[in-house]
Amino acid sequence: LAKTTQPISMDSYEGQEVNITCSHNNIATNDYITWYQQFPSQGPRFIIQGYKTKVTNEVASLFIPADRKSSTLSLPRVSLSDTAVYYCLVGDGGGSYIPTFGRGTSLIVHP
Amino acid sequence: DVKVTQSSRYLVKRTGEKVFLECVQDMDHENMFWYRQDPGLGLRLIYFSYDVKMKEKGDIPEGYSVSREKKERFSLILESASTNQTSMYLCASSLFGSSNTEAFFGQGTRLTVV
């Protein structure tokens, strides 16, 4: 499985846009990039997934450059409730896919 | 609404006890997983299963076993609980054979072994 590297922590303020970048230099051709969000004392929940270019949903955007060796999760106009740990995962998403989590990025949003 | 349900949110057990953590999913998913989460270590995979009566070891299986007698239920067993098994335990499920798999997690069980 491709290894991912992301910042341990980030700080932001309400109303700002937050971009969290994940490096995955060894990403394979069939790998998708998936981001999860985890609030304290809860299980992670899926935010967004992409393969290339840009994906947007009601929660976030995911930007993936042409070489796919990194990806950026973008959270527009964060609020205090976006304070959470964000995990970047890569994998082929096939039948035998095992979600493998690193330490994630702890985002703290300040008033 | 899809759901993965873990039997307990909080559990306190004594050292040496046999502990069962139960997980049930209602999405007819083939894949089920057990993780533990400790501060600063992220989620670590204990065991997983792709089918009924099938199990595979994850990264940290020592001291644990699992059971999957029915597709919807995946149980984690601590044969003889020890204090170093105090942790948050998370169960997840996902579809088999999907090209863009999303894993669904339960709310977690915080186990304290005293």
Image (cartoon, helix red, strand yellow):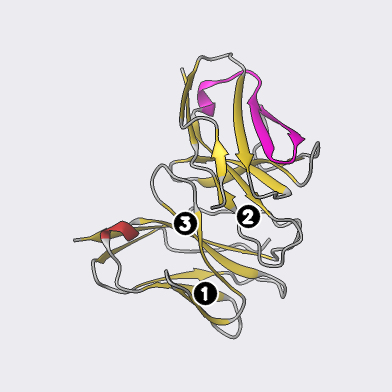
Is A98 left, or right, of A50 in this rendering? right
Measure how far apart labels 1 and 3 are at the Cα level: 14 Å
Local packing at callout 2 (Cα closer than 10 Å; few below 14, some 14-19, many 20+) is many
Q: Earlier in the sequence, mark 2 or mark 3?
A: 2
Residue A99: mark: 2
Local packing at callout 1 (Cα closer than 10 Å; few below 14, some 14-19, many 20+) is many
Mark 2 or 3, closer to the camera: 2
Measure how far apart labels 2 and 3 are at the Cα level: 13 Å
Residue A70 belongs to magenta span: no
Q: Which residues are magenta?
A: B64-85
Q: What amino acid type is highlighted by mark number 3?
A: Gly
Residue B67 belongs to magenta span: yes
Measure how far apart labels 2 and 1 are at the Cα level: 17 Å
Q: What amino acid type is highlighted by mark number 1?
A: Ser
At which x and y percent is residue B6?
A: 55, 36
What's the residue at 61%, 36% (across, down)? B23
On the same chain, marks 1 and 3? The answer is yes
Q: Chain of mark 1?
A: A
Q: What amino acid type is highlighted by mark number 2?
A: Pro
Name the residue carrying label 1. A71
For the residues labelled 2 and 1, say whether their Cβ atoms are less than 8 Å apart.
Answer: no
What's the residue at 63%, 45% (across, down)? B26
At which x and y percent is residue A84?
A: 37, 55
